[in-house]
Amino acid sequence: MQDLIDELGRLPGIGPKSAQRIAFFLLKIPKEDAVRLANVIAEVKEKVSFCTRCFNVAEGELCVVCLDPRRDPTVLCVVEDARDIVAIEKTQDFRGRYHVLQGAINPLEGVGPEQLRISELLRRLGDEDITEVILCTNPNLEGDATAMYLSRQLRPLGIKVTRLASGLPVGGDLEYADELTLGRALEGRREVDA
Ligand SMILES: [Zn+2]
């Protein structure tokens, strides 16, 4: 039982109290329900990994966005996390492709550019016909630092670099922005100054 509480406590957003509550809940539910949960976790770990091109979640080598021939290959939206793709897809305002950094620059937590998928991004810009990169990092300190760093890296390459328009809640998370606000921020994106 303590092992279960310890494991649950390692999940994001789950403190010791919540871990204990979930553990006792799992103890009470029918065995088949608990086994189903365990199986789903095992199955996801077995089948789902990250797209080798954009690092979105994928059930194969490439994700559904990369596999879709109707997507515009010239526009790339750079996000911190694969969850942000879900939020942007909901707006239905973006028809390009994505690149997931898998984090943001955060010196306090020891995350620098080399820990992010930036070298992979630069390689894509060399290999693919990308003319615009939209920096869709979160509107907070780490997201802004990451966008600034990327715009300095990308501008010399002659690629149009844009950033989401303001209007998103400052200090917030893209994931929690409503579709309308996010859609407007996408449409109103502006070119980043050097
Ligand atoms: Zn992909």
Image (cartoon, rainbow, N blue to C red):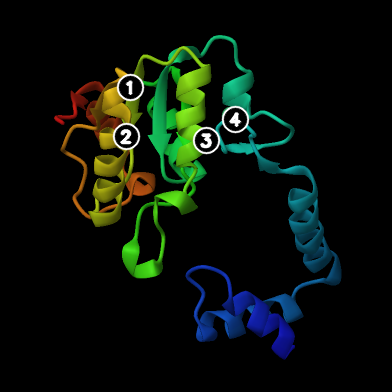
Label 3 secondary element: helix
Label 1 secondary element: helix
Label 4 secondary element: loop
Labels 1 and 3: the sequence-earlier one: 3
Labels 4 and 3: the sequence-earlier one: 4
**Which residue is disc 4 drawn over?**
53
Alpha carbon separation for disc pair 4 and 1? 20 Å
Tell me the kind of residue under disc 2: Gln
**Which residue is disc 2 drawn over?**
153
Alpha carbon separation for disc pair 1 and 2? 8 Å
Alpha carbon separation for disc pair 2 and 4? 20 Å
Rate crowding at label 4 as few (under 14), some (14 to 19) or many (20 or more) other CA atoms within 10 Å: some
When the figure is inspected, residue 36 is found, relative to residue 137, above or below; the finding is: below
* Residue 120 badge: 3
Does the CB distance between marks 2 and 4 fall below 8 Å? Answer: no
Q: Is residue 97 visible?
A: no
Q: Nearer the viewer, residue 79 or 27?
A: 79
Alpha carbon separation for disc pair 1 and 3? 15 Å
Q: Residue at x 35, y 54 (%)?
A: 105
Where is residue 108? Give x, y as percent.
33, 69
**Res 174 → quadrant:** top left
Alpha carbon separation for disc pair 4 and 3? 8 Å
**Which residue is disc 1 drawn over?**
157
Labels 3 and 2: the sequence-earlier one: 3
**Res 67 → quadrant:** top right
Labels 4 and 1: the sequence-earlier one: 4
